[in-house]
Image (spheres, grey):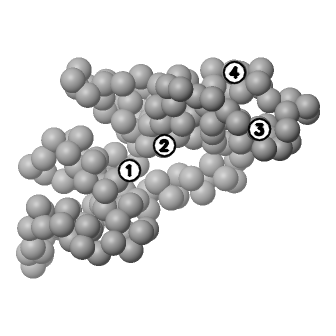
Amino acid sequence: MPDWRMAAPHPATQELRKIAGERFFRVFDDWLELALAAYAREEDRYMEVMRRYGPREAGKEHPADHFAHALGAIQLEMHKDNETGELRDHLGEIYEAEGSNERAMSQYFSPMPLCRMMASMLIDDTTPERASIADPACGSGRMLMACIPLRP
């Protein structure tokens, strides 16, 4: 997998950046909130967030369109990952890449190759099927993601 710092912005990021008038992390947080509300079928919660973006205007794009396209972009990227057998932390990659531009919001996660190496040191053929993994600084969950393909 190419290093995210060298690659073009994630397709979901490109969609979210089309929403004008808000800082990226406000838009990112709203997008996550909307996705969770949509999956949980919590219409009131969904509409509470969308009200901040105002009504649709004829002939103009609305942030709801960009939120939907960003979610679709994540799903398409995950579909590509499934085809190649790659596990990626898309949300963590977006957060980390965008945070590197804003000191107050930056966080840095363990690179996935390091997580895979640590997971391979923990999981082997003798690991019970229902083993627990302790990841006290779990961040976006990359360590647990790295353990998935190694489970017995």
- In the current view of this chain or complex, which residue is farthest to the right? 125
Distance between mark 2 and mark 1 Cα atoms? 9 Å
**Which residue is denoted by mark 4 in the rendering?**
118
Contact flag, marks 4 and 2 (Cβ < 8 Å): no
**Which residue is denoted by mark 3 in the rendering?**
131
**Residue 12 has which mark?**
1
Q: Which of the two labelled residues, at mark 1 and mark 3, occupies the earlier sequence position?
A: 1
For the C terminus, the image quarter is: top right
Q: Position of residue 95 (x, y in %)?
A: 36, 36
Q: Secondary structure at mark 4?
A: helix
Q: Residues within 10 Å of mark 1 (few under 14, many from 20)?
A: many
Contact flag, marks 1 and 4 (Cβ < 8 Å): no
Q: Residue drawn 46% across and 54% down?
A: 74
Contact flag, marks 2 and 1 (Cβ < 8 Å): yes
Q: Residue 7's image quarter?
A: top left
Q: Which of the two labelled residues, at mark 3 and mark 4, occupies the earlier sequence position?
A: 4
Residues 119 and 95: in front is: 119
Q: Which of the two labelled residues, at mark 2 and mark 1, occupies the earlier sequence position?
A: 1
Callout 2, which amino acid?
His
Callout 4, which amino acid?
Met
Residues 104 and 75: in front is: 104
**Residue 90 has which mark?**
2
Q: Residue drawn 63% across and 48% down?
A: 81
Residues 90 and 49: in front is: 49
Q: Secondary structure at mark 2?
A: helix
Distance between mark 3 and mark 2 Cα atoms? 26 Å
